[in-house]
Image (cartoon, rainbow, N blue to C red):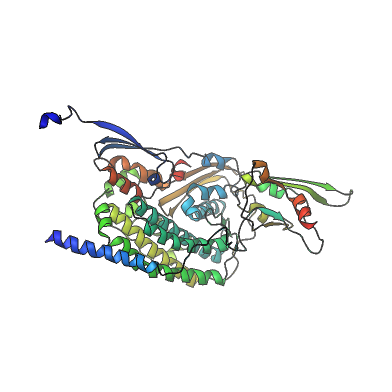
Amino acid sequence: MGYWKDIVVGGWSLIEGMKVTGRALFKPVVTVQYPRKHLEMSPAYRGHIELKIFPETGTHGCIACGTCQRVCPSGVIKVQGVKSHARSGKVATHYVIDYTRCSLCGLCVESCPTQTLKFSTEYELAGDSRWDGVVDLVARMEDSRS
Amino acid sequence: MAEYFPQPAQQQIYSLNLGPQHPSTHGVLRVLLTLDGEYVLEADPIIGYGHRGHEKMGENRTYLQFMPNASRMDYLSGLLYNHGFCLAVEKLAGIDPPERAKYIRVICAELNRISSHLLWFGTFLMDLGAFTPFLYCFDDRENILDILDRVSGSRLTYSYCRFGGVSRDVDEVFVEQTRAFIKRLRSRWPDYHNLVTKNVIFIHRVRDVGIIDKDLARRFGVTGPNLRAAGVAFDMRKVEPYEVYDRFDFEIPTGTKGDALDRYRVRLEEMEQSCRIIEQALDQMPAGPYRQERVRLKVKPPRGEVYFAFESARGQTAYYLVSDGSPYPYRVHVRVPSFGNLHCLTDVLKETLVADAIAILGSIDIVVPEIDR
């Protein structure tokens, strides 16, 4: 009795399972054909960091205070700045990040006192050498403007 | 006839390395099996391939800088680890987050728990040879990742919680998306049950296999769904309610025997209970600030120590922090559930078949980087 019951109940369970997969055949496709179609990243997406350009000044607001450099868990940020004359504040001339070692925690963006850092929504990052990941953000910003 | 096929004079005992690179070990884990034919005589899990020294790293960086590390120990429930670490430091430094932040954290943590269980569901069945459920549950999991991506900015290693709040506020869209997701997940249960729970092949593979009873669980420190499957209703969210878990009405699903089928049922039921918690939290979530502004970047807790235990997706997890009054912790120790869950296999795998060994290994839901850390 148990033997035949097992066969009937078990066989029916397999048919039930096939029904689920059969229904899935007629449902809309959920995957995106990636290289041909790109997804929009959410505004919160944490990519690598970038310097923001403020429209009032037309440039970044980095004062080279080094807060991001100190707060970074992996030590990937190096900032250098100069004073144009004795009374003026510092302005960053170099802002180098080693993106290959960045863990994208976002502490630098949160700690920035002038809010001049933002995340980019870029996600297609590949290079031939690991030095491709080392970027000077000030130079990059100037390149993008010219 | 018998002289043509002479019986071996003695048993042919040999050892087999399962792993370190094997699809069913879920990471770099090696299980040294001593086999007699297809029977396992002895099993010895060998760990340490993924050691990155997270505890040591904690000693030479500030509390806030250790935050990204916390989600990299157990990458499947990173938010829960972030959450627990935040709570431990808040307890040590006496920071009180605003009400809204507490609810946001609980909702996101429970979403993360569901996503972790869904991934376990897929990989466990893939270990048993069923490929289709894997695709369905990854479709569901993708929804959670999208929701969490929108609020935290990351899909796997969230680093979302901060001392005294969370890094970004949630909006109406998040609430709508979460409610829609819960509705969708509930409509999927019948499919999952038809596809897997009632499946005769599945039942015969997991029923009465790999029994972890109360006694064994106590000896090895097994916690989480594996312990609850043995019939012990032990859940840190109920036993020592932290955050706002005492305000929600939810049950702790338990099994009876503690075999692989019970563990499967408990986890499936736990996802439903997580849905209930999220629904209640969404209803109760107050408006207000999402982060306490007065917390300094370099948190300096007073001299002292704290032990804080919470329930991650795999069981009781705990942080033990010792502070000497400086911005750097003196010691960061993490109690991970997978260690105990894995090492009870030395007893459980004895006298089972190799095919059952894979089913048992899959059913206890280990994350190896968490053990090695």
Examine the rendered structure and indicate whether residue A83 appears above or below residue B114: above
**Residue sitting nearer the eye, A102 or A1:** A1
- Give B61 or B191, whichever is nearer the viewer: B191
Give the residue drawn at x 57%, y 47%: B66
Q: Looking at the picture, how far across and down is residue B237, in whole percent?
A: 41, 58
Q: In screen coordinates, is A10 left or right of B339?
A: left
On the image, the x and y values in percent for residue B311 come to: 42, 54
Q: Residue furthest top?
A: B9
Observer-nearest residue: A143 or B141? A143
A9 sits left or right of B113 in the view:
left
Compared with A83, B184 (above or below) is below
Residue A122: where, in percent of width, then height?
Answer: 64, 56
- In percent of width and height, residue A115 lies at 72, 58
Given residues B189 and B9, the one toward you in this image is: B9
* Residue at image location 44% in from the left, 69% down from the top: B182
Q: Is residue A30 visible?
A: yes
Q: Is any atom of residue B231 visible in this view?
A: no
